[in-house]
Amino acid sequence: MRSRWRTGVLAAAGAATLLAGCGIRVSAEPSPSSRPGTAAVASPVPASEAPPASPSALPSGTPSTSPADPRYVIPPVRSSGAREAALAAAIRRVEAAARVNAALPAFDQLAASMVARSGVPGAAVAVVAGDTAAYVRCFGLRRLGSPDNVTEDTLFQLGAVSRSYTTTMLAALAGEGELRWDQPVRCVWPGFRLRDRWATREATFRDLTAQRSGLPAYAGAELLPFGYGRSGILRRLRYLRPAAGFRAAYAPQDAVFTAAATGAERATGASWVELVRTRVLAPIGDEQTVLGFRAYATAPDKATPHRLVAGSMVPRDPSNETVFAPSLGVSSSLSALVSFARLQLNGGALGGARVAPAGLLAQTLAPTTAVAAGASGPEAAGLGWMVWSFEDRLVASAEGGLASGTGAVVGLVPDDGVAVIVLANAYPQGVALGRALTKTLIDLAARGAAQGDWLAHEQAQAAATAQGTTGLEARGAPGDAGGLAAVDAERVRGLVLPPEAPAGAAARARRVYAGVYADRYYGRVTVRPGPGDGLSVRLGRGETLRYVPWNRDIWRDTASGTAAVFSVRDGRAEAVTLTLLAFDGRRGAFARAD
């Protein structure tokens, strides 16, 4: 009787797919009032649009209609222990879906309030539960000053959420035997090299996508202003000193993550774009997600980035993330991300198509390297995901914030089969909003009420983070102006100068400094007389920095306040340290090369 009751409840909740994976046949039909999605408050997706009894959530014994392709064949669950575990998982997911549906009215009110308070011009929010979009709602405008509203099909740049697409592709390749998570990248790409010989020899696809190479945070990003392309940056990583032991620490590294995608390209002979499109997007019928900047820039329905300037949101040009596209270059819509989230929650299968084996895809959500310990528990890096705990639940999140002005958050609660997706066209407000809505939904479903003002909490965290500087911004505090003229290059790393030069400061003639200087990691910089009494410093074939006299052989960058410190002997500069490029293990020291 108990088994029949459970079967009836699961069938009524639309979980026939889950039971099929357990070897249990379901004959009962769900009533209209009990179908998933009926409790959604804003723009719910009707249950009739969800694939009925498709083997998308757990393996089913029924083969797909494409048996010739092993990606489309769902293996059966054979052992009784596996059936019992699958049944327990199905019951948990059905119960979780019921709690989420009950929480949606309150969530809808809080979501509307949080979006308004966050200040983002536009946002798109979805909740996945019970293998369907239980909640979908869009807010605001694609661009301030334009009448076009955000819709489910509006494209947003995803930033670092792109990594989850790349690791899903790698899991698909691993399932087809074209590479392995624990295979050294050098086996398929002999040209891969880091400064550490052990890391060069042993670094695997798992290591690179877990971002535990030992290189400093954002390694390679500081080379973008020099005008290097992807191959040039990846080649120069061999000259960068590690900041930690190999596999000892996590650090976000778009270049290293891109190196993993390059390894997949070498293993298959196909480009990253082709691999993601054919191995991930096409099998799940995703025709909206675009790969690379050009496709986003030419799309008619896209969100414009915004940043807060002098208290007002201002539209900004989008970031061109072509160089690190496997880590930052995916753009997608809310409706497409719902399918992608369902694919992750369903163990790599969706609508009868298997993209990747469940075990191999599950490794992307497994913790690999500790990142931090918070009030709710430890946080660790997965493969393209961050893994943490909240309300006694394992949460995997992919977050992308681009400085141009966009934020994206995809939060998964894998055991419950629940996902929260938030897209917004402002940074950092969009990321804070996504984190807050994820925690709010979990609170509502687990405890029946939000346990705090999560938006205020996340905004405070974002403000604290903004107090530090990132990327190529200067590090450190202003030094003692009185003795700066005599300090050596080792001591001025990260130096930021005050605008006012010391009293009586004087500079040498600019011809003393003119010339070409070089560093193995950065390459060349060219110093020439600049406008007025300043100096121009060209970074490779890329950007030009402007410096003004500050104190004898120390010049000040007018944009960042950082210094160019020259070492002069016999009336000719022999070296220069650019403190803009001297941080987190980078020396920023260039020797004369002409």
Image (cartoon, rainbow, N blue to C red):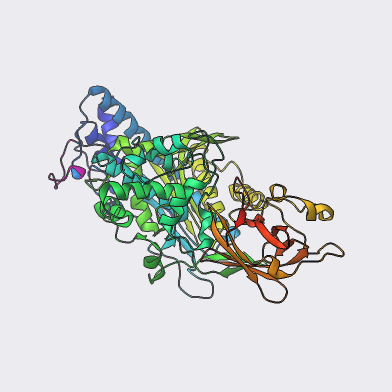
User: Which residue is pictured at 55% across the width and 44% down the height?
Assistant: 216
Is residue 566 visible in the rendered image? The answer is yes
Viewport quadrant of the C terminus: bottom right
Residue 113: x %, y % from top left: 56, 57
Residue 259: x %, y % from top left: 40, 48
Q: Nearer the viewer, residue 547 or 270?
A: 547
User: Which residue is pictured at 46% across the width and 43% down the height?
Assistant: 194
Magenta stretch in the rendered image: 61-71
Report the side of 119 relative to 534 (left or right): left
Asked whether residue 390 is drawn in magenta, I would say no
Above or below — where is 373 with respect to 144?
A: above
Above or below — where is 583 with respect to 414?
A: below
Residue 166: x %, y % from top left: 36, 49
Q: Quadrant of residue 87?
A: top left
Q: Nearer the viewer, residue 328 or 241?
A: 241
Is residue 36 visible in the rendered image? The answer is no
Q: Nearer the viewer, residue 58 or 156?
A: 156
Asked whether residue 62 is drawn in magenta, I would say yes
> Going by the picture, which residue comes out furthest to the front?
570
Viewport quadrant of the N terminus: top left
Report the side of 34 relative to 159 (left or right): left
Residue 153: x %, y % from top left: 37, 63
Q: Quadrant of residue 505?
A: bottom right
User: Which residue is pictured at 28% across the width and 46% down the height?
Assistant: 267
User: Which residue is pictured at 61% across the width and 43% down the height?
Assistant: 452
> Going by the picture, which residue comes out furthest to the right?
503
